[in-house]
Image (cartoon, helix red, strand yellow):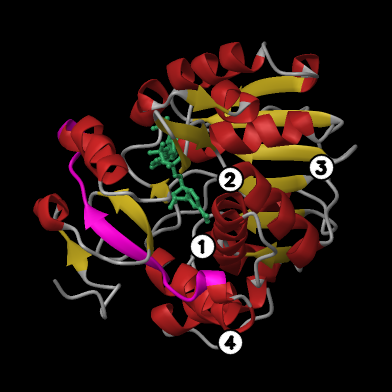
């Protein structure tokens, strides 16, 4: 079996005769071809291997995994000796019921994106919230403690972001979504979190007049993945000191253009991707992880200009 191209999309059939001699990690998703996680993690592992021999044979692979076979895939990866797994669309929620242990924050958000090997199965974590918090701090100078946050979206990414905001002690958390039923579900789930009385929901199609004029806006909707997408909210109503973090990345979308127009600080989601990866690799290796190597790996894979992590 060939292991020298970790970026190749693999099928689970390959696990039947898996004979990689080192420590293996993987990302599972469907579709998965576009994932830059192998490039990011292998860049960090290469660097770590130069100073810590232990990591020389660690390698990260990608497997295309349709949702109906996720339970079997997790069993197969465990039997094949994998040390850790990342989960992406559409597995993060389903996997909550497939782990033998779960981190309290991940449990609260109802989603896991990082699995760590245990003797009898997998322990589940969610590093998306950590990734967002680090990205906000490093790119926009935002400390979530006592911040006023307007979170747009109520899907998987928004759940992790909302839990992180409450765990980190925001002053106010406004959550706007188009589908009110989904929004209600998220707000109910947050009742278990510390500081849930600071949460206010609103209809993203009709933002209320009392929405704060100065805030940290986090776009966790999928609007903005395509450059013809409209902005999820009209920035004209906010003060120029407002800061905008967009979980999407890869295109200069309407939200980015609008933030530039109103001279608001703006950052895209690449940094969140990198920092959630840093946290996952820390969980698996127990070691300090070179974030810049992960950023370089991600930028290279995407064909972006180099960026600072
Ligand atoms: P989900 O499918 O779980 O949620 C999608 C969200 O987008 C929902 O709130 C949905 O609202 C909203 N939405 C979709 N279309 C529209 C529309 N036309 N108008 C208004 N709202 C809309 O996706 P995820 O939560 O997993 O991901 C959300 C975004 O975050 C994606 O762009 C994803 O790529 C990004 N992401 C980035 C990460 C990073 O590391 N940078 C990590 C994880 C996610 P409704 O309920 O009304 O349908």
Work out whether mark 3 precedes mark 1 in sequence or the reverse, and give the earlier one: 3
Nearer the camera: disc 4 or disc 2: 2
Query: Percent from the top left, x then y, of residue 2?
Result: 17, 75
Q: State the SS at label 3.
A: loop
Ligand 1 is within 8 Å of the C-beta of the residue at disc 1: no
Give the magenta-colored segment's residue range.
54-68
Residue 250 vertical placement versus 47 (above, below) = above
Q: Secondary structure at mark 2?
A: loop
Q: Can you identify the residue that label 4 sits on?
A: 306
Residue at 35% across, 54% down: 27
Q: Which numbered circle lies on residue 254?
A: 1
Q: Residue 70: percent from the left, percent from the top?
A: 23, 35
Q: Which residue is mark 2?
A: 127
Quarter of the image for residue 294 reads bottom right
Label 2 or label 3, whichever lies nearer to me, is 2
| Mark 4 touches mark 1? (CB < 8 Å) | no
Which residue appears farthest toward the bottom when viewing the image?
A: 305
- On whether residue 62 falls in the magenta region, the answer is yes
Mark 4–mark 2 distance (CA, rounded to whole Å): 24 Å
Mark earlier in primary sequence (4, 2): 2
Say which element carries label 1: helix
100 is higher (above) or lower (below) than 170 = above
In this rendering, does residue 264 appear at all?
no
Q: Which residue is mark 3?
A: 213
- Looking at the image, residue 239 sits to the left or right of residue 271; the answer is right
């Amino acid at each position: 079996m060939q292991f020298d191209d970790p970026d190749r999309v693999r099928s689970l059939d390959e696990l039947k005769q898996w004979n990689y001699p080192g420590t293996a990690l993987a990302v599972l998703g469907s579709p998965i071809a576009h994932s830059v996680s192998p490039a990011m993690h292998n860049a960090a592992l290469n660097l770590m291997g130069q100073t810590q021999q232990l990591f020389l044979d660690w390698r990260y692979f990608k497997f295309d995994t349709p949702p109906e076979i996720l339970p079997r895939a997790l069993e197969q990866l465990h039997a094949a000796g994998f040390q850790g797994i990342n989960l992406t669309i559409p597995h993060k929620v389903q996997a909550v019921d497939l782990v033998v242990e779960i981190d309290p924050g991940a449990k609260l958000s109802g989603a896991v994106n990082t699995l760590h090997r245990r003797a009898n199965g997998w322990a589940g974590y969610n590093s998306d919230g950590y990734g967002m918090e680090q990205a906000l701090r490093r790119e926009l100078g935002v400390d979530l403690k006592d911040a006023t946050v307007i979170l747009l979206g109520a899907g998987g990414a928004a759940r992790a972001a909302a839990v992180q905001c409450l765990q980190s002690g925001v002053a106010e958390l406004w959550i706007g979504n188009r589908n009110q039923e989904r929004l209600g579900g998220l707000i109910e789930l947050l009742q278990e979190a510390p500081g849930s009385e600071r949460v206010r929901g609103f209809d993203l199609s009709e933002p209320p007049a009392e929405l704060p004029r100065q805030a940290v806006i986090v776009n966790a909707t999928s609007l903005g993945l395509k450059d013809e997408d409209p902005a999820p909210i009209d920035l004209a109503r906010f003060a120029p000191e407002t800061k905008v973090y967009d979980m999407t990345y890869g295109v200069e979308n309407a939200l980015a253009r609008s933030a530039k127009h109103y001279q608001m600080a703006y950052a895209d989601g690449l940094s969140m991707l990198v920092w959630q990866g840093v946290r996952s690799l820390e969980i698996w290796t127990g070691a300090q992880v070179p974030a810049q190597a992960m950023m370089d790996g991600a930028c290279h894979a995407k064909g972006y200009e180099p960026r600072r992590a």
